Amino acid sequence: MNLEFLKRADDLRRRDFLRFTALSLLGVSFAARASADPASAAATNRASRPTAKNIIYLYMSGGMSHLDTFDTKPGTKVQGPVESIATSADGVRISEYFPLVARQMHHVAVMRSLTSNQGAHEQGNYFMHTSYTLRGTVQHPSLGAWMLKFAGRTNATIPGSVVIGGGSNYPGSGYLEPQYDPVLLGRATDGLKYSKRFKGVTADEFTRRQQALMAFSQSFAAANPIEPVNAYQDAYDQAVTLMRSSDLDAFSITDESKASRDAYGDTPFGQGCLLARRLIEHDVRYVEVDLGGWDTHAQNFERVSEQAAILDRGLSALLAELHQRGLLEETLVVLTTEFGRSPEITDNLGRNHHPRAFCGLLAGGGIRGGQAYGATDASGIAVADNPVTIPDFNATIAYAARLPLDTVVHSPAGRPFTLADKGRPVLAVM
């Protein structure tokens, strides 16, 4: 199979394949390769090493208010009615809306100095997921696609990337090969649809139909030797493999105890977090769970409290169970959003878009928990210490997952790109 790949591949892909294979055989991780970049050199010498082989990415769609969640400003006018509470991390205080997460903060690094230049939802969402600004000439890959390209699938029989509750504007594989696209699930409770034979179709009949389709596809592919045709056949072969996989049970959260399901909360997001844990246990590389509803232009405090209650149960249960099952060190949990909300409180008790300063969370995967990195000023309007750009944030995620930051991949138009553009990892959180 590899020989056939090399025969078909262009020079760039052959070089990449041989280099990646050699590095893997020698036991050298991508992120720790020799490099003239000082961040890479410093990372190689650090006592703490990245340990994530999987990522659970929790996306707060709509622009989560940093002031009312994980970057509170107690005693100030901009804070409004929200109080701050102590956590299991010494000196780290968060919003009163997160009493359960507060008990898990010793696992978490809060990054309070994220900053972006994208203040609209679609553009901010795209920038956060790809490290590149949205433009009509090229579709950039999402982090999940990069994860599969560089790290590969651990379990060959089920999808390597799954997005739960999102996907309407998801970048997917971008200019990378289509096999790096995620499987999109509307709700965790729906399971993986169309993954079993239709009723009335026996195993023998299914095999007969499969053989007939294969014969037709092979003749068509021989007459049309182009990548989309091969990609379709690959997708079909993977679907058939999936239908026969015992790991399909990973998608069935009804197999979980009532106590476990209740711990996550009876919400699409909570059950999505539970499904994410199950998928990680079955070696799915990347799982994203989306929680919308954070676009709080009006009634900010009422709406944030409602969303926070959903997030509090789902995130706290996820961190607790990953830790209890010995999975947290090999799983990086990310929580982020497209931008924060303005310190100014509007006449209708809302907060407007605010990309200039906001926050995100990292836990597991070699991240040093129990800390807050960076800071905003007293009003929460601007970054005052250790700014982290969106490419920097994504580079930190990639480094924790041992993905290469300096490997160049060319788009079909021949343009060179890297995973996190010019971003560098924040090594202080490792």
Image (cartoon, grey):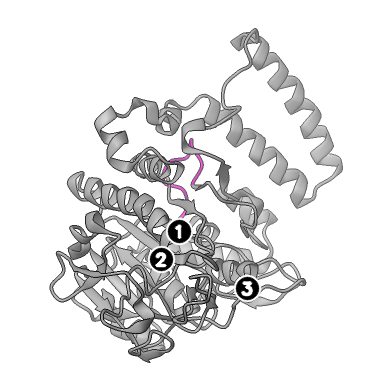
Number of marks in the image?
3
Q: Is residue 165 one of those drawn in magenta?
A: no
Q: Amino acid at mark 3?
A: Ala
Tag of residue 120: 3
Residue 145 in percent (x, y) is at 55, 58
Which residue has dot 2 on it?
23
If you read the primary sequence from the N terminus, does the residue marked by circle 1 or circle 2 appear first? 2
Q: Quadrant of residue 308?
A: bottom left
| Labels 2, 3: front one | 3
Residue 428 percent coordinates (x, y): 27, 81
Across and down, in percent, residue 398 comes to: 42, 68
Please say if 329 is above or below 119. above
Residue of label 1: 303
Q: Secondary structure at mark 3?
A: loop
- Residue drawn where x is 22% and y is 72% of the image: 93
138 with respect to 43 (left or right)? right
Question: Contact (CB < 8 A) between labels 2 and 3?
Answer: no
Gap between marks 2 and 3 measured at Cα: 41 Å
- Please state which of residues 305 and 120 is positioned toward the viewer in this rendering: 305
